[in-house]
Amino acid sequence: MSDATLNSTGRHLASRSGSLTLSGYFSRITNWALGLPRAILNILIHWQRRAEDKDRIRKLDDRLLRDVGLTRYDLKEELEKPFWSA
């Protein structure tokens, strides 16, 4: 394949002219379309875990907060952040 460009998996992506082949184009669209729901699901799972973690840390008593190096003020600041913000 001296006149073809390969990606890291060895798939044919483009000719030397730089144009994407039709099958390569549809392959990229399909991969993107199939990966999008998975990416959205992963984000939602991450946000849910973050919300659960905040709920757990909210319930810690002062002694346990000191053990992990937090104060009630630190906790208040963390809990006021929106769930999508780290």
Image (cartoon, rainbow, N blue to C red):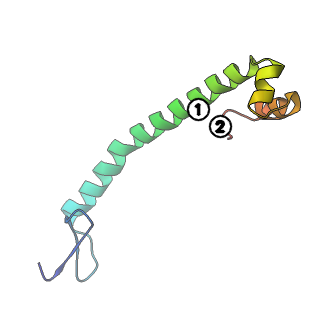
Give the labeled residue for mark 2: 84
Q: CA distance from mark 2 to mark 1?
A: 6 Å
Classify 37 as above or below 52: below
Q: Is residue 12 left or right of residue 49?
A: left
Q: Is residue 26 left or right of residue 42?
A: left
Q: Residue furthest right?
A: 73
Tell me the number on the disc at residue 47: 1
| Residue at 85% in and 31% down | 71
Amino acid type, label 1: Trp
N-term-proximal mark, 2 vs 1: 1
| Residue at 46% in and 33% down | 41
| Residue at 83% in and 21% down | 62
Looking at this view, is 9 or 74 the one in front? 74
* Location of residue 23 (image quadrant): bottom left
Is label 2 in contact with label 1 (beta carbons under 8 Å)? Answer: yes
Quadrant into which the C terminus falls: top right
Q: Position of residue 70 (x, y in %)?
A: 80, 33
Q: Position of residue 58 (x, y in %)?
A: 75, 21
Disc 1 crowd rating (10 Å Cα; few below 14, some 14-19, many 20+) is some
